[in-house]
Image (tube, rainbow, N blue to C red):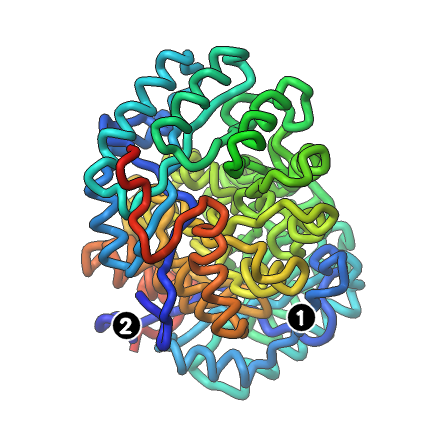
Amino acid sequence: MRSVGQTTPTADCHAHIYPLGRSLYPRRSITFSASDLIKRMDEFGVVYSGVLAHPAPAATVEDGAREHDVMAGQIKPFADRLVPWCWVTPRWRSAGIAEARRCLRLGFRGVVLDPIQEDFELDDPAVAPLCTLASDAGVPVFVETYLEHRGAEPWRLVALAGRYPSLPFIMAHLGGIGLQQNMTGATLAAEVPNVYLETSCTKSDPFATFEGPARILGAERVVLGSNQPLHHVALNLRKLELTALAEDEKDLIRGLNFLRLVGVKTRQPVGEGSV
Amino acid sequence: MRDGCLVIDAHTHVIRGAIDSAFAEPSGRATRSTAISVDELVARMDRYGIDKAVLIAHAWSDSSIEDIRHEHNVIAGDIQRFPGRFVGVCTADPRQGKKAVDEVRRAVEVQAYCGLKLLPSFHYYNVDSFLVDPLMEVAVKHSLPVLYCSQTHYYGAEPWRWVRLAKRYPSLTFVMCHMGIDPFVTESLAVPYMVKDVPNVVLETSATTTDPYGVVKAPVEILGPQRVMWGSDGGSFLHPELELLKVDLAGLEPEAKRMVLGANAARIFGFSEA
């Protein structure tokens, strides 16, 4: 699903793999390997994908480490296309810091914070050591933000980002469903220079998903994301095409912004010799 | 037509002038045109192979009874201009009491509206409250399908309240628009399981997120294809092409796709399938 005249690669910031199967909800389980992800990427013209680790609720740090190791093994054959992110929680305290350091040594390219699943408050001081670690390592932080979940609200992320002005934070889901049509997630993000908007789990509103946020923040701060496999990348790719953005703005959103954030040079393999 | 199926969009609007202030973008740097005329709506339907549509009158949070009456008159005129393309659904704010009831009666009996839409998320009431009973009695008398915007995070409009209302009026068909909207709710399949044993509730797919399985395929598997209906909410904001792509990506069997894309709406709203 490449755009007419597109010369830059499509990169999806936000995907997951569940190679061992996972019950994501009591009535919805899914098995989705790295090979399955590559197959879907090929079908829809996606060259690179971020792969976010996603341990089960109440995971111990040992569970998290196993998840990271399985993920690294899955990704290895596709290291030129899949960009791994590690997942850590303040609940793991110093062991979480150690696990994040281990992952970054393995070649993981970013850190995921999930206050929705973990029920912590983003602006809690307990989050600080993880941000300091990411800042020191020069990797971005992906944050599961959601207006409708206490602790994960986008205004808390903006407060957190203000304390780490050189650390890029990615605000997932445009900040939450209640902010999508009026684009308040972008307005909040505009208060600081280091928050980027990610577009997964959004409605079929091309303007509010891409064009409006790009007008408010600049196209260089909007990042294509799908949240595959639960959600489908084809819908957001087509949604971007339906906007009136200029082709160079679409190129940034469609992949260049994400690749810049995770330090991928598009003519070079991702993670070669690492994961 | 799409893949040989009649396509009926079960949820469209024509919007004149400014929208509700709740949708206004706060920074002022990304304002957009919100108006869409019936001519633009028809052109868009033609572009995407949408044969017919349910055109829903809308009432904002501050609409008076006179505003609603005017909206009904204008929408009725729009429908008359395109014979065979639309059926109309009228709207009401139950806080307006007898005036709202009388206006719904007029819209149905004089202007041939064939459904009623409720918007508790705009009008600030609990949809399972006694306030709506007089309107439901009109709906029962005229066999009107009742549509409603379900929104998980708006007090009064939550999907479970609609289920309570549907159980009180088992002879009516209730069309739950948006399935609660929230992506976590659709991902978890909460709404189709919530309504599974309430046979007079039909789910309509508009204004949902990018999850074709959770929005389309799973509800069809759980409820049967006769209880899931495609809609775009295509007015100022949401795009029908994306909502159609969602159905394509769901990978339904041909007969189920035929029912979801149009046959169910034809049955419920009285469209001809020709």
Q: Residue at position x 58%, y 65% from top? A: A211
Percent from the top left, x then y, of residue A243?
Answer: 51, 70
N-terminal of the pair, mark 1 or mark 2, is: 2
Q: Is residue A64 left or right of residue A35?
A: right
> Which quarter of the figure is the C terminus of chain B placed in?
bottom left
Q: What residue did someone put label 1 on?
A: B32
Please identify the quarter of the rendering in which residue B3 is found: bottom left
Q: Is mark 2 on a helix, strand or loop?
A: loop
Residue B2 - label? 2
Marks 1/2: CA–CA distance: 30 Å
Q: How many marks?
A: 2
Please identify the quarter of the rendering in which residue A175 is found: top right
Percent from the top left, x then y, of residue A28?
Answer: 32, 32
> Which quarter of the figure is the N terminus of chain B placed in?
bottom left
Q: In the rendered image of this protein, does residue B68 appear above or below residue A155?
A: below
Q: In the rendered image of this protein, does residue B58 appear above or below residue B38?
A: above
Badge 1 amino acid: Arg
Mark 1 belongs to chain: B
Q: Between residue B116 and residue A64, name the one nearer to us.
A: A64
Badge 2 amino acid: Arg
Percent from the top left, x then y, of residue A238?
Answer: 40, 65
Q: In the rendered image of this protein, does residue B131 appear above or below residue B36?
A: above
Within-10-Å neighbours for mark 2: few <14, some 14–19, many 20+: some
Marks 1 & 2, CB-CB < 8 Å contact: no
Q: Residue at position x 78%, y 64% from top? A: B65
Q: Between residue A10 and residue B264, name the one nearer to us.
A: A10
Mark 2 belongs to chain: B
Q: Evaluate whether residue B19 shows in this view.
A: yes
